[in-house]
Image (tube, helix red, strand yellow):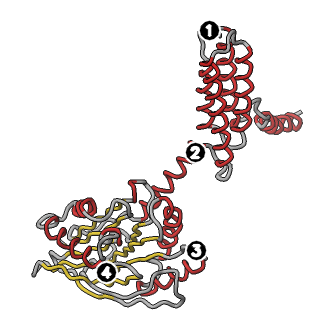
Amino acid sequence: MTARGDADRAARPSKLKVARRRPRLVPRGNRTLTLLVALTVVATMVVLIWPTNAPMTVLIVPLLLGSLLLGPRQLPWFVVFVMVMLMLAIVRQREITPRIVLAITVLYLLCFIVLLTSFRRSRLGVAGVQGESMLVDLRDRILSQGKIPELPDTWLTETALRSAGGTPFAGDFIVSVGTPGADRLEIVVVDVSGKGEQAGTRALLLSGAFGGLLGALPPADFLPAANEYLLRQGWEEGFATAAHLSLDLVTGAFEVRTAGHPPPAQLDAGSGRWTVHEGEGPVLGLIEDAEFLTIAGVLRPGDALLLYTDGMVETPKRDISLGIDRMLGQAESLLRGEFDGGADRLVDSLGSRNDDRALVLIHRR
């Protein structure tokens, strides 16, 4: 009896597990579709019962909700269902007036627009709200790559990014690497070919790749490795410019290497003058085995350094050298005695609103 009772008790958990694994009447993925179908049926019944008081346009509500919440596999069938319900509502109309004809036309036109949207969305494979949340997450990941780590109190580092047309996606991005308590800061400012949303996808891929390379390689090897990575992609417009800074936070000694990028500018606190560090380096992604010259210098207390993209200094009607002179003139007035918030002030006052802009301001207090 004891052995049999033990066997029965041992079998009970397995039976419970089997019971728990029974399929649901309505899978979780279809709950939204079921609720929307029920809402459509209720709306249709209201139109059928009170045809003179309830307009057929109430069917727009479930149609709009479906376009936002349903995935690309479910949405086309739901749109067809809404169109069938609309046909039932038309049958019960006592009199077909021009106003009703116009409402019917608009409703069917909206159904076809939602269908076209679902076919385009099928390439992504997610619903509208989910797709938007994914894009927001991707944008946040790009921005997080450029977050400056905690630095000693003697250092101020600010970044500012503006995209063409004010969109949240840009071809300019910043990547920084450093750990709390570390004595070295690595920053790279990148300008991907194109602007706005067109360059945003390439910027996302490159920001992740450059974030992995930055700090994992010696400073002198970063740009050659980034150049090889871009060459392997085989993009038709797969080039980018970059400026890489490696800064010793103890001594203030720095090294800058540029790849087809505007030259960095340094403020000498003793003389109050800005110096442009001209360097040579080919654009990333065009030439194999490219070599990049090193610009070395020291940031003393009171000094500052600017890294920026061409959107800050270049416009169709102005040469880049004149744009650099204008930027440094603005820096003299906007940063005089107050560096906090200086990056945003410079970006907002300079550059073209039709081009992406990025700037890094480093100040040794």
Q: Residues within 10 Å of mark 1 (few under 14, many from 20)?
A: few
Residue beneath disc 1? 52
The kind of residue on which mark 4 rests is Pro
Q: Secondary structure at mark 4?
A: loop
Q: In the drawing, what numbered circle is on residue 263?
A: 4
User: In x, y percent, where is residue 103?
Assistant: 61, 23
Q: As drawn, is 15 to the left or to the right of 122? A: right
- Above or below, 220 against 19 in this view is below
Q: Pointers 1 and 4 in contact (CB under 8 A)?
A: no
Task: Determine the CA span between mark 2 and mark 3.
Answer: 30 Å
**Residue that appears at 64% across and 33% down:** 109
User: In x, y percent, where is residue 177?
Assistant: 40, 71
Residue beneath disc 3? 236
Q: Secondary structure at mark 1?
A: loop
Task: Determine the CA span between mark 4 and mark 3.
Answer: 26 Å
Task: Determine the CA span between mark 1 and mark 4.
Answer: 72 Å
Q: Secondary structure at mark 3?
A: loop
Q: Residues within 10 Å of mark 4 (few under 14, many from 20)?
A: many
Residue beneath disc 2? 130
The kind of residue on which mark 3 rests is Glu
- Above or below, 326 against 58 in this view is below
- Above or below, 114 against 346 in this view is above
Q: In the drawing, what numbered circle is on residue 164?
A: none
